[in-house]
């Protein structure tokens, strides 16, 4: 399965937005990861509906929209997304997960279910038919710069095994949070193939070198 880097735009230097976007395009970055936080599901606010509209206007790179919001099923229409985009919603954020995933699919986007470190995988085993991937949170969501929750490494492997055992070998495993050069190797070995890159790798120091280095690590 192709190993891909999704830069987390909440970590961007917005004074260098165009420059950093050009760097992503030059490196063939496959998706841009956008963290949407409502201050209720997670204790932070980040990128919103207007930001998504603006990004859409300035690049053709598809979007990987990570909704860390409560009741997403009632708010999906607030967001511009469609064919070719990924939209992740948290299993912990809604009473109607399957309906919400169906709504994402009906709009042509790829539905992913996101799962926090403390949430057991059994909570998503009845929506495997409705998803194109699992976003395994490897930190507690809400802020950049946090440290890996170590037990999530084994959870990545269990998530991979769960998908493979249920006829979903083509579904992706995305990891998000403290994807450092060291952690990315462990996450890749555990079965992840999509790496959300933030302050732990791509956004500190020379971005060109960091992207190349992270690609070497995940494809190593
Ligand atoms: C955490 C966010 C991540 C984060 C990744 O809630 O979803 O995307 O920004 O960045 P680092 O590498 O700082 O964990
Ligand atoms: Zn995220």
Image (spheres, rainbow, N blue to C red):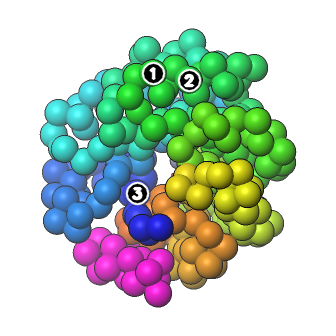
Q: Is mark 2 within 8 Å of ligand 2?
A: no
Tell me the residue that label 2 is attached to: 102
Q: Residues within 10 Å of mark 1 (few under 14, many from 20)?
A: few
Q: CA distance from mark 2 to mark 1?
A: 6 Å
**Horizontal side, residue 46 vs residue 54: left or right:** right
**Horizontal side, residue 47 vs residue 90: left or right:** left
Residue 140 at what x, y percent from top left?
A: 70, 50
Tell me the residue that label 1 is attached to: 106
Residue 207 lies in magenta, yes or no? yes
Q: CA distance from mark 2 to mark 3?
A: 24 Å
Residue located at (19% from left, 59% from top):
25
Tell me the residue that label 3 is attached to: 6
Picture layout, residue 208 above or below residue 102: below
Q: Main secondary structure of the magenta part?
A: helix
Residue located at (29% from left, 61% from top):
29
Residue 117 at what x, y percent from top left?
A: 76, 52
């Amino acid at each position: 399965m192709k190993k891909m880097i999704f830069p987390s735009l909440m970590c961007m230097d917005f004074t260098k937005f165009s420059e950093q976007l050009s760097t992503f395009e030059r490196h063939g970055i496959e998706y841009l990861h956008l963290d949407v936080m409502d201050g209720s599901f997670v204790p932070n606010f980040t990128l919103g509906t207007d930001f998504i509209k603006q990004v859409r206007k300035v690049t053709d790179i598809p979007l990987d929209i990570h909704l860390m919001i409560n009741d997403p099923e009632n708010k999906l229409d607030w967001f511009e997304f469609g064919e070719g985009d990924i939209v992740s919603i948290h299993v912990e954020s809604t009473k109607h997960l399957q309906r919400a995933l169906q709504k994402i699919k009906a709009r042509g986007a790829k539905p992913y279910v996101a799962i926090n470190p403390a949430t057991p995988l059994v909570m998503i085993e009845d929506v495997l038919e409705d998803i194109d991937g699992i976003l395994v949170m490897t930190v507690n969501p809400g802020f950049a710069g946090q440290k890996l929750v170590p037990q999530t490494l084994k959870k990545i492997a269990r998530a991979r095994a769960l998908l493979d055992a249920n006829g979903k070998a083509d579904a992706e495993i995305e990891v998000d949070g403290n994807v450092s050069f060291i952690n990315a190797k462990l996450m890749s070995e555990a079965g992840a193939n999509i790496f959300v890159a933030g302050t732990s790798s791509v956004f500190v120091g020379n971005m060109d070198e960091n992207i190349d280095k992270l690609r070497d690590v995940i494809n190593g």
